[in-house]
C-alpha cells in the first residue's frame, strides 16, 4: 500500500465517523473546520519550495498555492472508481474500499476547475513586463 495513502487516507483525519473507510462514499467536503488538517501534506516540503522560489531572481516565478485547498475535499477523490494496471476495478474490488480505494487522485469537477480559475486569475492579474529582459547577457 502507498505510504502516503496510509497517512492521507485515514478517515479520522477528515473527521470520518465510526466505520468510515478512507475517502469511500464521501459526498461532502469538510465544512466548518477550525483547526489544521493532518492528512499527509508535508509542510516542510511546501516551505522549502517557497524558499527556493524567493531566491529566483533572473526568471520571475509566481506560486499559485493550492496546497491546502484539496485537503478539505475528501469528496473529490476517485475512491473506488479508478484504474488498476490500466483496467477499471471489478465490482468485487469496488466492494472492498479498504484495499482498493484511491484517495490520492482527484477527479470530480470542482476541485481541478478551481485550480484552473486560480491559475487564470494569476495570469491576468500580473501585468506583462514593460520590456522583456534577455535571459543571457
Image: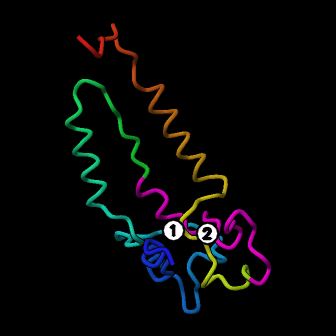
For the magenta stretch, what is the residue range?
67-92
Who's the residue at 43% across and 50% down the image? 66
Image quadrant holding the C terminus, namely top left
In the current view of this chain or complex, which residue is farthest to the top? 131
Who's the residue at 30% across and 61% down the image? 43
Who's the residue at 40% across and 16% down the image? 128
Instruction: Say which element carries label 1.
Output: loop
Task: Pick whichever, 79 or 122, lies toward us.
Answer: 79
Cα distance between the residues tagged 1 and 2: 8 Å
Residue 97's quadrant in the figure? bottom right
Residue 40's quadrant in the figure? bottom left
Please report contact status of discs 1 and 2: CB closer than 8 Å, yes or no: yes
In the current view of this chain or complex, which residue is farthest to the right? 91
Instruction: Say which element carries label 2.
Output: loop
Q: Which mark is residue 13?
A: none
Task: Pick whichever, 84 or 126, lies toward us.
Answer: 84
Residue 30 in picture, x, y percent from top left:
52, 69
In the current view of this chain or complex, which residue is farthest to the front? 85
Residue 127 relative to residue 81: left or right: left
Membership of 87 in magenta stretch:
yes
Q: Nearer the viewer, mark 1 or mark 2?
A: 2
To which residue does mark 2 refer? Answer: 28
Residue 60 in picture, x, y percent from top left:
31, 27
Residue 115 in picture, x, y percent from top left:
52, 45
Membership of 78 in magenta stretch:
yes
Label 2 crowd bin: few (<14), some (14–19), many (20+), radius 10 Å: few
Figure label count: 2
Residue 38 relative to residue 110: left or right: left
Who's the residue at 62% across and 52% down the image? 110
Task: Pick whichever, 92 or 8, lies toward us.
Answer: 92
Q: Which mark is residue 31?
A: 1
Label 1 crowd bin: few (<14), some (14–19), many (20+), radius 10 Å: few
Amino acid at each position: 500500500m502507498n505510504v502516503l495513502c496510509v497517512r492521507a487516507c485515514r478517515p479520522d483525519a477528515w473527521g470520518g465517523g465510526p466505520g468510515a473507510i478512507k475517502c469511500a462514499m464521501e459526498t461532502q467536503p469538510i465544512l466548518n473546520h477550525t483547526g489544521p488538517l493532518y492528512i499527509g501534506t508535508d509542510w516542510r516540503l511546501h516551505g522549502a519550495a517557497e524558499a527556493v522560489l524567493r531566491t529566483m531572481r533572473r526568471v520571475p516565478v509566481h506560486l499559485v498555492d493550492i496546497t491546502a485547498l484539496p485537503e478539505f475535499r475528501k469528496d473529490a477523490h476517485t475512491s473506488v472508481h479508478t484504474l488498476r494496471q490500466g483496467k477499471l476495478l471489478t465490482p468485487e474490488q469496488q466492494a472492498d474500499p479498504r484495499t482498493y480505494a484511491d484517495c490520492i487522485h482527484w477527479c470530480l469537477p470542482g476541485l481541478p476547475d478551481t485550480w484552473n480559475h486560480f491559475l487564470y486569475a494569476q495570469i491576468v492579474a500580473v501585468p506583462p513586463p514593460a520590456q522583456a529582459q534577455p535571459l543571457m547577457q
